[in-house]
Image (cartoon, coloured by chain):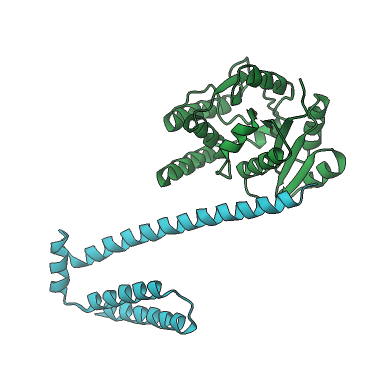
Amino acid sequence: MNKSKVYITIPLYNDSKMILKVIKSLNDKGYNNIVVVDDGSTDNGYELVKNNTNAIVTKHIINRGQGAALQTAMEIAIVRGAKYIVHFDSDGQHDPKDIDHMLNTLIEGNYDIVLGSRFLKRNNIPLKKRILLKGGILFTYLFSHIWLTDVHNGIRVMTADTAKKLNIQHDRFEHASEILDKIKILDLKYTEVPVTIHYTEYSMSKGQSISNSINIAYKLISSKIRE
Amino acid sequence: MVIQIIATIIILGIFSQLIRKILKDKASLTKIIFWVLFWGISLVIIWLPKETIDNIGSIFGVGRGIDVLVYLSIILLFYSNFKQTENINKLEKEITKLVREVAKKQIN
């Protein structure tokens, strides 16, 4: 498969420990169009990427949130001629091996977007995380009327056309629910494929807490009311 | 009587601030008119006889006139809070747009 039109978008926030490893693992799999948007990190992640990789890298001068960084990265990828866009995390949770399969599914099934699901294969998701995610699945169903096996899983593959339509408006973590909501509203053709998530102490320490999840739900509901 | 005097002093203080803003041409005319009316009416209400205020209250189905004022104040506060949240959200979006444009110009 020709990977020259595939762009991997990575929002980066204080992940200098992992980012070089993540980019290298993507390069090893043949993905060389990588857009990294440093979201106002306080560490030296931006400099590390700039000086040690061939990635396209830029920086939000102040922190605007993961959704905002993803949107910036997607806009850059589109301008550079991306045909397919991949959302990928900077903390080493995602496995580059999954992208091939997701891309093949997207192309062969003529989908607009393919979402990764950690529940579709045997997994070792910690109990607390599992409960939180199941709650998220239920919330997504009630909120967007879309039933998935996993939500807030950052690995997604889509066509550039879909990326243009999505136009993420929620700057912070609510963007993950916004994407699902828009899949329903825009009537996009989607599917889920099993993916591996590497839970390490490091990635867990950066994950969502219960209070954060409540905050996300509140922001989504209030924005829906304002529409 | 004491509370009425204190409230009057506070309102007069607010009026002096408003006058200062008018003189410095810092506020829009509609805002000035709104606040002059608001605090002017408040000042009148404070000095109305208790029976008159209670009569106003009974029109709204509330026993005491002062309760009408409290309810109105709460509604006003909620509204201004809603407006402020709206404005902050709008500003946040503008900031993101700005940060994004800067980022796009500084690609390495």
Q: The green chain is which one?
A: A
Quarter assignment of residue A96: top right
Q: Position of residue A159 (x, y in %)?
A: 64, 29
Q: Looking at the image, can residue A154 be seen? A: yes
Whether residue A14 is visible, yes or no, is no
Q: Say whether residue A162 is left or right of residue A203.
A: left
Q: Please, is residue A150 above or below residue B87 in the view?
A: above
As drawn, the residue found furthest toward the top would be: A122
Q: Nearer the viewer, residue A32 or B60?
A: A32
Q: In this view, does B46 lie above or below B103?
A: below
The hue of chain B in the figure is cyan
Question: Where, quadrant-wise, is the C terminus of chain A in this rendering?
Answer: top left
Q: Nearer the viewer, residue B57 or B22?
A: B22
Residue B22 in percent (x, y) is at 44, 81
Q: Residue furthest right?
A: A52
Q: Quadrant of residue B48?
A: bottom left
Q: Which residue lies at the image location 81% right of the left edge and 25% below the top edge?
A: A30
| Percent coordinates x, y for residue B108 in the rendering | 80, 46
In the rendered picture of this protein, how many numbered marks are placed on residues?
0
Left or right of B64 on screen, residue A99 = right
Place of residue B58 in the rendered image (x, y in percent of width and height, measured from the top left):
13, 63
Residue located at (74% from left, 40% from top): A36
Compared to residue A79, the image places residue A156 above or below, namely above
Front residue of A206/A149: it is A149
Image quadrant occupied by the N terminus of chain A: top right
